[in-house]
Amino acid sequence: MSDVPLAYPVPWLFIRDHAPTYGLKNASLETLKHVSFALLGPGSLPEHFPMTIGAGETAWLPIAGDDLARATTLVVRWRRDNDDEYLWRVVF
């Protein structure tokens, strides 16, 4: 047996249908804690506090910017119940 952890599927579904408000749905069966968001590039996102997002819940993010798909990346950060921290980069 190996002590290498099993792969962990990204728990998020990124919803682009309501731009310029984007949804980040927790598509997993677990509650994700200390969820925070940051933008890399010229877009803008209102300041927010880290949040908890339950299974099936969606966080709605108003993200402004011209041509986000060309130069902006959303970075999502969260913790699971075991306190492991994860990062996921989303492009528009």
Image (cartoon, helix red, strand yellow):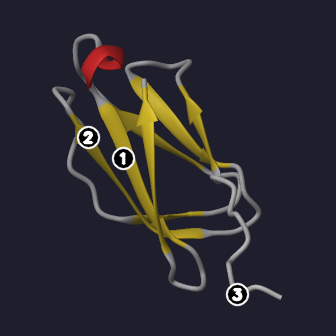
Q: Amino acid at mark 1?
A: Val
Marks 3/2: CA–CA distance? 34 Å
Extreme front residue here? 1
Q: Is residue 43 above or below residue 56?
A: above
Residue 27 horizontal side relative to residue 69, left or right: right
Disc 3 target residue: 3
Instruction: State which quarter of the image contains the N terminus.
Output: bottom right
Query: Circle 2: is it few (<14), some (14-19), or many (20+) Cα within 10 Å?
Result: some
Element class at badge 2: strand
Disc 2 target residue: 39
- Residue at 65 percent of width and 53 percent of height: 11
Extreme top residue here? 67
Residue 74 horizontal side relative to residue 48, left or right: right
Disc 1 target residue: 75
Q: Amino acid at mark 3?
A: Asp
Which circle, 3 or 2, is nearer the viewer? 3
Number of marks in the image? 3
- Residue at 70 percent of width and 64 percent of height: 7
Element class at badge 3: loop
